[in-house]
């Protein structure tokens, strides 16, 4: 399968580093946000428990559950991003290529879940969810590009490394006259 040899305007390795660092930072921020969501949900659950209408308590429980799920997803994403960054520190070869696969697999699952959640929001909330749906589509587009680049990076790792000249070999420079 023919895939790109470059990631934007840099090499595949440079692109893998950029993707790994960017996604690592974003997922760490996601961990912090999910923890905040869990804290707010827990507080709402405690406040809403004594109220006659338990809607606030139910909302708090839902927010705590969603925050917990988001935190777990972000932690797994952080681990796959670290594996991707470790692969960039290794020499070209199949062992380093195998470290790219968890990122590709997890990112693919994450993109699919993002599309499913966008559809659920659109069906449940309607046009008021258009901001989230737009965000999800941009995220999926960028994520697909990252997955394609990392599959290319994986293939690059599985190629035979180009033979380097032997140590001490004399290299000749030929100039063309024109």
Image (cartoon, rainbow, N blue to C red):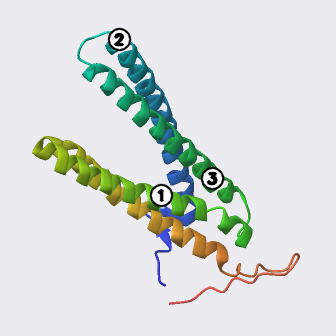
Which label was assigned to residue 93?
Answer: none
Given residues 166 and 59, the one toward you in this image is 59
| Residue under numbered circle 2 | 47
Which is closer to the viewer, label 2 or label 1? 2
- 122 is higher (above) or lower (below) than 147: above
Residue drawn 25% across the image and 50% down it? 120
Residue drawn 50% across the image and 74% down it? 5
Q: Residue furthest left?
A: 127
| Residue 93 visible somewhere in the drawing | no
Which label was assigned to residue 85?
Answer: 3
Label 3 secondary element: helix
Label 1 secondary element: helix
- Horizontal side of 117 relative to 103 (left or right) equals left
Residue drawn 63% across the image and 48% down it? 82
| Disc nearer the start of the sequence (3/1) | 3
Instruction: Pinpoint residue 164: horizontal percent, then vertical percent.
Output: 76, 78
Instruction: Pinpoint residue 65: horizontal percent, then vertical percent.
Output: 43, 34
- Horizontal side of 111 relative to 124 (left or right) equals right
| Residue under numbered circle 1 | 107
Given residues 57 and 21, the one toward you in this image is 57
């Amino acid at each position: 399968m023919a895939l790109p040899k470059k990631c934007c305007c840099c090499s595949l390795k440079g692109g893998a580093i950029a993707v790994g660092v960017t996604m690592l930072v974003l997922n760490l921020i996601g961990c912090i946000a999910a923890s905040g969501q869990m804290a707010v949900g827990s507080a709402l659950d405690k406040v809403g428990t004594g109220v006659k209408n338990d809607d606030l308590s139910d909302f708090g429980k839902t927010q705590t559950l969603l925050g917990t799920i988001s935190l777990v997803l972000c932690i797994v994403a952080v681990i796959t991003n670290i594996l991707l960054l470790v692969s960039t520190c290794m020499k070209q070869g199949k062992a380093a290529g195998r470290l790219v696969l968890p990122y590709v697999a997890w990112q693919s699952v994450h993109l699919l879940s993002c599309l499913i959640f966008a559809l659920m929001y659109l069906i449940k909330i309607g046009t008021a969810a258009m901001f989230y749906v737009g965000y999800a589509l941009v995220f999926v587009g960028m994520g697909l590009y990252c997955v394609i680049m990392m599959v290319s990076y994986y293939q690059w790792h599985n190629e035979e490394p180009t033979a380097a000249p032997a140590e001490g070999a004399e290299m000749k420079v030929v100039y063309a006259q024109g």
